[in-house]
Image (tube, helix red, strand yellow):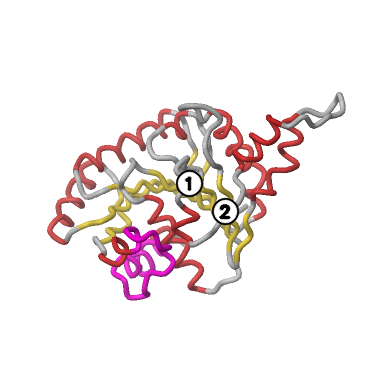
Amino acid sequence: MGKVIAITGKGGTGKTAVTAMIIRSLLKRGEKSTILAIDADPDANLADALGDDVEMTVGDIREGIQDSRISLPPDYDKKQLFAAKIFEALLEKDGYDLLVMGRSEGSGCYCFLNSLLKGIMDETINDYDLVIVDSPAGLEHLSRKTISEVDSLIVVTDESRRGLKTAETIRQLADELNLKYGNLYIIANKVHDLSKDQILKVATGLGLKVIGMIPYDENVARLDLVGDPLVDLPDDSPAVVEVEERIIKEIGL
């Protein structure tokens, strides 16, 4: 069975950037492991961060089937057709595959896509050495048990106490819902040197394990500003160094 890592956190913390940098670091190793990246965030920014052009999402397939006038046999429903077509949205890249869930079917409701994600996870986990999920911001995917079993649940936070309290809330919700996870880790992102001791103090007080403190990095800010992919970060970028030398080792990758 492959290893499953889910990365979450409140909006604005840079969880997609962290996801992309983890994938970047794994690809730099050149190991022949199979990786599936799933962008489950409705904002769907992971492809841009990886420098990929996505022509079709899982949501697009769903909408196409719903809008089509396909004549189906009496014993064949649209869910079966969807299951057969789902991997048309799979983008195969050198070193990893990418699946983008896309936006919801209606204003504010992601129930159907959440259900699809759970089905995809159940079907594909054994086909890859690693499945890494860029989860939606917030707590909805946890409350709906979209991801019911992961090896590592990673919460990306900023350097504020409020951000760490959000991480504690996510842990409490995961426990209340009886979600199965091996480890819950915290990654503090866009951290300034003066904040590091306070982050560790607050995290320790909350019983949270911090596996990395990614420094504020002008290289990341510059690429984000112009919309260039984060895979183009230089190897000596402070954020890259923290991910490669500490974070992926702490996760066990």
Q: Specify the quadrant of the image occupied by residue 223.
A: bottom left
Give 52 or 250, whichever is nearer the viewer.
52
Circle 2 sits in a helix, a strand or a loop, which is it? Answer: loop
Q: Amino acid at mark 2?
A: Val
Report x, y in % for residue 105: 56, 30
Q: Is residue 189 above or below residue 135?
A: below
Q: Which percent across, then down, holds residue 185?
A: 36, 49
| Dot 1 amino acid type | Ala
Judge the density around disc 2: few (<14), some (14-19), many (≥20) Cα neighbours within 10 Å: some
Q: Residue 89 location, x and y as percent?
A: 64, 49
Residues shaded magenta:
223-249
Label number found at residue 44: 1
Q: Residues under labels 1 and 2: Cα distance?
A: 10 Å
Sequence order check, earlier mark of 1 and 2: 1
Which residue bears the numbered disc 2?
Answer: 54
Q: Residue furthest top?
A: 74
Q: Indicate the position of residue 218 as horizontal and vertical percent values.
A: 25, 65
Residue drawn 51% across the image and 52% down it: 132
